[in-house]
Amino acid sequence: MHLTLLGAAMGTLFVAVLLGTWLSGLYLLREQPPQGMITGLVHGSVGALTVGLLLLALIRPPETMPHPHPHGTGGASFGWMAFVILAGALLGGLTILVTNLRRKQVSMLLVAMHACAGIAGAVIMAAYWTTYASFGR
């Protein structure tokens, strides 16, 4: 199976979710991530890469499909919904980064909203990916 933009976005999203899960566990235990903020920066970079890959996949669907969103699948707008939600999560993550750089206390509500947006975006993107993979070949 060849690697598509959407498949690459799903792979990077999986890595971002795993790192985010680990970081949220450390945050809830009130421990500092190893090597300062390196883990958080990797998490954010992979998340930003995911958003970029998803945008490229939405703008340029593969030529193998006669139409990027087959009628009757019910998931035609899932890709753009996932993009908007994940972009919002990215903005929340950037806010967390700026707050950390200012050496201020990060709000637990902001962390929770960032995590919820990331999870919701991941679920919707997975639904879009499975719909696309099922009907696109």
Image: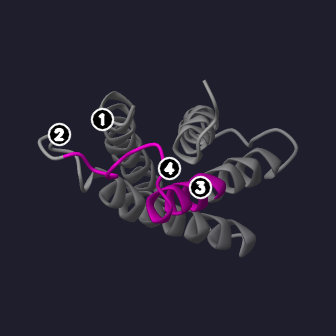
| Residue that numbered label 4 is attached to | 62
Q: Which mark is residue 73?
A: 2
The answer to which of marks 1 and 3 sits earlier in the sequence is 3
The answer to which of marks 3 and 4 sits earlier in the sequence is 3
In the image, 4 versus 94, the foreground residue is 4
Q: Position of residue 17 (x, y in %)?
A: 55, 37
Question: Decide: marks 2, 1 in contact (CB < 8 A)?
Answer: yes
**Residue shown at 45% from the left, 55% from the top:** 114
* Mark 1 residue type: Thr
- Work out how far the residue at label 2 is from the one at label 4, CA to CA, in angstroms: 17 Å
- Whether residue 87 is visible to the viewer of this picture, yes or no, is yes
54 vs 65: above or below: below
- Work out how far the residue at label 1 is from the one at label 4, CA to CA, in angstroms: 14 Å
The answer to which of marks 2 and 4 sits earlier in the sequence is 4
Q: Quadrant of the N terminus?
A: top right
Q: Is residue 35 left or right of residue 31?
A: right
- Work out how far the residue at label 3 is from the one at label 4, CA to CA, in angstroms: 13 Å
Q: Position of residue 104 (x, y in %)?
A: 64, 70
| Residue that numbered label 1 is attached to | 131
**Residue shown at 17% from the left, 40% from the top:** 73
The answer to which of marks 2 and 1 sits earlier in the sequence is 2
- Work out how far the residue at label 1 is from the one at label 3, CA to CA, in angstroms: 18 Å
Q: Which residues are magenta?
A: 49-70
* Mark 4 residue type: Pro
